[in-house]
Every structure is written in C-alpha cells, then in structure tokens.
Amino acid sequence: MARSGTEGRGVLEGAFALMEVLAHGEEVGLTRLATDAELPKATAHRLLGQLVALGAVQSRAGRYRLGPRTFRLGQAWHPARLLRAASARPLRELAALSGGLSLSLSVPEAGHTIIVGGMRGEVDEVFPLRSGIVLPPGSAAELILAASSPAAELPKGWTKPTWTREVRRAQERGLAFEYGQCVSTLSCVAAPVFSTSGQVVAAVAATALDGKQIAPLGEAVGRAAAMISANLTKLPTPTPTPGTQPRPPIQGPGPQAPHPAMARRR
C-alpha cells in the first residue's frame, strides 16, 4: 500500500525509492511505480516530473526509465577496486567452464548484498545481475556472507528456523545453493572470498535458468573464490584517504563448526 504524504518520508527518500524501482532496467508506468515505491500516485507523479526535468529519469508515452544523468553519475561509482581486480581472471576462467551462465561478485553494504562485479549471461534477461544491483533477500551470496557473520539480520520473507538451517548448511559445505527461493526461475551457487586477514569479504556466485546446471558447478565456483582470495594477498593495500576510517572486517563464523573454506584463516 502506498504511504500517505504526511508520514514523514522526505522528498529525497521518495525520489530514490522511485529510481530504485527503475533500476531494474525496464520502462514502468506511473501506477506500478507509485505502488512499488510505496508512494501516493500524486506524489510519485510530482517527483517524477522533477526527476525528468533534471535528466535523472526519462519519460516516453506515460512510461518511465532511468535517464542519462543517472547513468553518468553511476559510472563514477567504482566500489571494491581490489576485489574487482583480483576477480577479473578467475571470473573469466569460470565463465569458460560455466557455458555462459551469469557470474557475480557481491559484498555486504548497509544491510544489503550488492553486486560489484561479474560477467553477464542469459540470466540477465530475467534478472539483471550487473554492478550496483541489490540481490533479493535470501540469495546464495547472502547465505555465504551470513554464515560468517553471527550478527546478520534475518532476510525479509524468511522464518528464523529456515534461515538458520540454510546458514548452517553453508557453513558446513563452504558453499550455498539456492533454487528458486529468491527469483522463481533462477538458481545459484555461491562461495566465500577471504581477505588477507582471513575474513569473508565477498561472495562469488553462478546463476542459471536451469537448476540442474548448478550442483555440478559448486566445485568450480569454490575454486574461483579461492583464486580471488589468493589474488587479494598479492595486491597492494590502498592507502586510506586522510580523515577516513578503514571499514571493519566482517566478523568470523559463529559457534557452528564450519567447513574449512568458511573457517577463519590463521
């Protein structure tokens, strides 16, 4: 249900909610935009008019999509530079084995799991797995990250017993498998990437339209993640920008006995 305009939702928050809906890459009409962004239709129409005037959104025949200004701004976002550099060759080699499946490299950010790199494939016709996309709650990548973080929040749409069971499985196997729970037509397998200090900092995942392709890829995805982890030890650590504090690493595994791949390195 759309919220009333008096619930204290700021103008910027509403504008970004609309752009988040449009970030899925398709043209969307006003009614669906307002519903998905949880805004009154009149408020959504007013904000869209302002975004169109600024070039952040484009309008055509009553439908909307992200505009060129948003694209230009997005190109300036280059997160996880070391991870992207370390993953370039392993992902190319994994792509050669996976037969055109979509590959992604994801990190935790502000309570979400965000893609920061990868290689696109057939899955992108159903769900775009490009940099900047927030993965749906309960993805295989999120399971991998949660398996190393006891304080991880329960994803929306999951019960605690079910989520706890899946996280435990990811700890035990060093891999996470997901078959249609996030997006009904997609299946994926993910493996952990470790920093030089042994903390899980990212997840590598292969995603397919055919769930039968996923299980055989587990070992290859695990090898790619291990290669990325090894590459991270060879790259120079960037010097922090003056006045900034380095981000704390993701915490290591909880009391469950993890798979060796998920155990904190010494």
Image: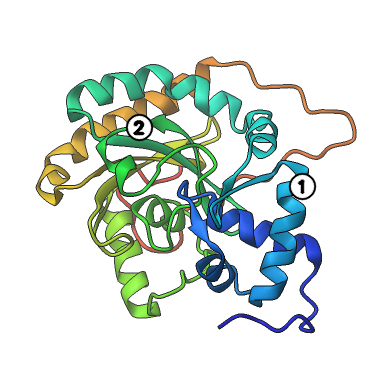
Query: Which of the 4 image quadrants contains residue 35?
Result: bottom right
Q: Where does label 2 land, which residue?
A: 120
SS class of the residue under badge 1?
helix
199 or 37, which is in the foreground?
A: 37
> Residue flagged by tag 2: what amino acid is it?
Arg
Regarding mark 2 in the picture, which secondary structure is present there?
loop
Query: How far is mark 2 from mark 1, CA to CA?
Result: 32 Å
**Above or below, 251 relative to 118:** below
Q: Quadrant of residue 256?
A: bottom left
The residue at which mark 1 appears reads as: 53
Q: Quadrant of the N terminus?
A: bottom right
Image position, residue 244 (x, y; %): 84, 37
How far across and down, in percent of the image, does residue 231 sit?
Answer: 45, 19
Query: How would you rate the neighbour count of disc 2 (Cα within 10 Å): few for under 14, some for 14-19, many for 20 or more?
Result: some
Quarter occupied by residue 40: bottom right
Q: Is residue 110 visible?
A: no
Residue at the spot 78% in from the left edge and 28% down from the top edge? 240
Residue under the image location 54 percent in, 58 percent down? 21
Q: Position of residue 161 (x, y in %)?
A: 34, 79
